[in-house]
């Protein structure tokens, strides 16, 4: 239940962001408010994991200067940059396409392993990636056809350019998070998973708030009209920070502890389907056969890729590391 609830909560992030855009907030304000409100909760998570979970590897290991810089770098890639690019992309594409692109994370990690670590790519893995990317293309074409309901198109931008721009931004977000996943494996051994996620997220919170302040200070001389935002925007931001950010991190990682990473990832496949349902219900985003077919292809490809990767002998580095945070659809 923890893994299932976490996957659904993560998928609600895009819905809440879209609703915030309708309240007049821009991407920098959305991510800034989200991380500002989440900061004390992530700080509590980092403290709690080091005080109340002494059995977890590295939970009470001292934070050296070298580890602090590594955590800062992971926070930049995995939570600051990935979140900013994701919310920027959501201004242009549907929530369903955004979630489908983010679910390419395992394939991006594999490609980076092939390019940077010399890992061999098996035929089954190649076929699985082709299926997943083909599914994203089908969902992309769905967005292309219904671009009039996308935020970017609604703001008078060219619909085709909006969908392409949003897709590229969200893919770069997935790439940034994949780099975080690759780099976090070894640090888990030193700090523990929850402690690492807590401190990396705290670092990202500070970065996101500073970005929000600086961007609007130089462009408008104010914080993106935050004082003029209606109470609904503040309520949605609080929901985004708690139910769609901090809580799902804890739920998914608790699910991994109870079920194991493999089964928890499979349960997490419900994420795109819940996004489609919530987007149709709350945002009036159309549901077409191409959207369902493309999403099914993405999920099928990730399942096949996961099984094919298990059958491949792991390198010593891969065997020694376990990424901190959900590998599929997290953020």
Image: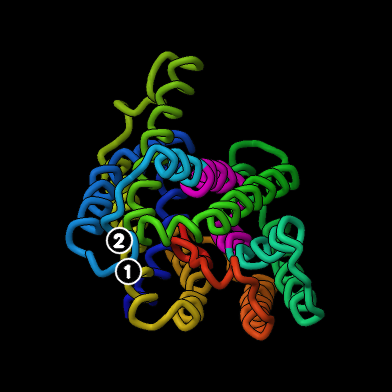
Q: Position of residue 245 (x, y in %)?
A: 36, 55
Q: Residue at x 64, y 50 (%)?
A: 148
Binning the other alpha carbons within 10 Å of mark 1 as few (below 14), some (14 to 19) or many (20 upward) gives: some
Q: What is the number of the mark on residue 251?
A: 1
Tell me: 169 left or right of 213.
Answer: right
Say whether residue 86 is magenta: yes
Magenta-span inclusion, residue 301? no
Q: Quadrant for the N terminus, please.
A: bottom left
Q: Nearer the viewer, residue 145 or 237?
A: 237
Our reading of the magenta stretch's main secondary structure is helix
**Gap in angstroms between the C-alphas marked 1 and 2:** 6 Å
Q: Quadrant of residue 310?
A: bottom right
Marks 1 & 2, CB-CB < 8 Å contact: yes
**Residue 249 can be seen, yes or no:** yes
Q: Which residues are magenta?
A: 77-102
Q: Give the residue at mark 2.
A: 247
Q: Which x, y percent locates residue 86?
A: 54, 48
Count neighbours of disc 2 (C-alpha within 10 A) and say few if under 14, some if 14 to 19, many if 20 or more: some
Residue 37 - label:
none
Which residue appears at 67% of the width and 51% of the height? 167
Mark 2: secondary structure: helix
- Tag 1's secondary structure? helix
**Lateral position of residue 238 relative to residue 175, left or right:** left
Front position in the image: 194 or 87: 194
From the viewer's perspective, tell me whether residue 6 is left or right of residue 153: left
For the point 44% across and 62% down, the residue is: 325
Q: Is residue 321 above or below residue 98?
A: below
Q: How many marks?
A: 2
């Amino acid at each position: 239940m923890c893994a299932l609830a976490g996957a659904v909560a993560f998928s609600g992030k895009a819905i809440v962001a879209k609703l915030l855009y309708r309240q007049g907030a821009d991407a920098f304000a959305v991510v800034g408010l989200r991380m500002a409100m989440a900061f004390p909760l992530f700080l509590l998570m980092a403290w709690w994991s080091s005080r109340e979970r002494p059995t977890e590897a590295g939970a009470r290991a001292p934070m050296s200067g070298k580890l602090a810089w590594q955590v800062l770098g992971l926070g930049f890639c995995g939570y600051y940059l990935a979140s900013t690019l994701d919310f920027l992309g959501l201004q242009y594409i549907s929530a369903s396409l955004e979630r489908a692109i983010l679910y390419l994370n395992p394939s991006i990690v594999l490609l980076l392993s092939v390019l940077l670590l010399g890992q061999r790519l098996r035929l089954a893995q190649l076929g699985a990636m082709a299926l997943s990317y083909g599914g994203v293309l089908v969902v992309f074409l769905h967005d292309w056809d219904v671009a009039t309901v996308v935020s970017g198109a609604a703001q008078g931008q060219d619909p085709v350019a909006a969908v392409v721009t949003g897709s590229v931004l969200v893919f770069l977000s997935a790439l940034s998070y994949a780099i975080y996943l690759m780099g976090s494996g070894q640090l888990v051994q030193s700090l523990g998973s929850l402690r690492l996620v807590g401190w990396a997220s705290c670092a990202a919170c500070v970065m996101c708030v500073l970005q929000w302040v600086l961007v609007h200070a130089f462009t408008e001389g104010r914080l993106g009209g935050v004082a003029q935002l209606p109470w609904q925007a503040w309520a949605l931001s609080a929901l985004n920070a708690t139910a769609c950010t901090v809580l799902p991190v804890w739920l998914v990682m608790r699910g991994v502890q109870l079920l194991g990473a493999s089964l928890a990832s499979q349960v997490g496949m419900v994420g795109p389907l819940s996004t489609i349902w919530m987007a149709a219900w709350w945002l009036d985003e159309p549901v077409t056969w191409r959207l369902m077919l493309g999403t099914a292809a993405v999920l099928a490809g990730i399942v096949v890729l996961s099984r094919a990767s298990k059958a491949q002998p792991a390198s010593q580095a891969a065997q020694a590391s376990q990424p901190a945070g959900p590998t599929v659809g997290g953020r």
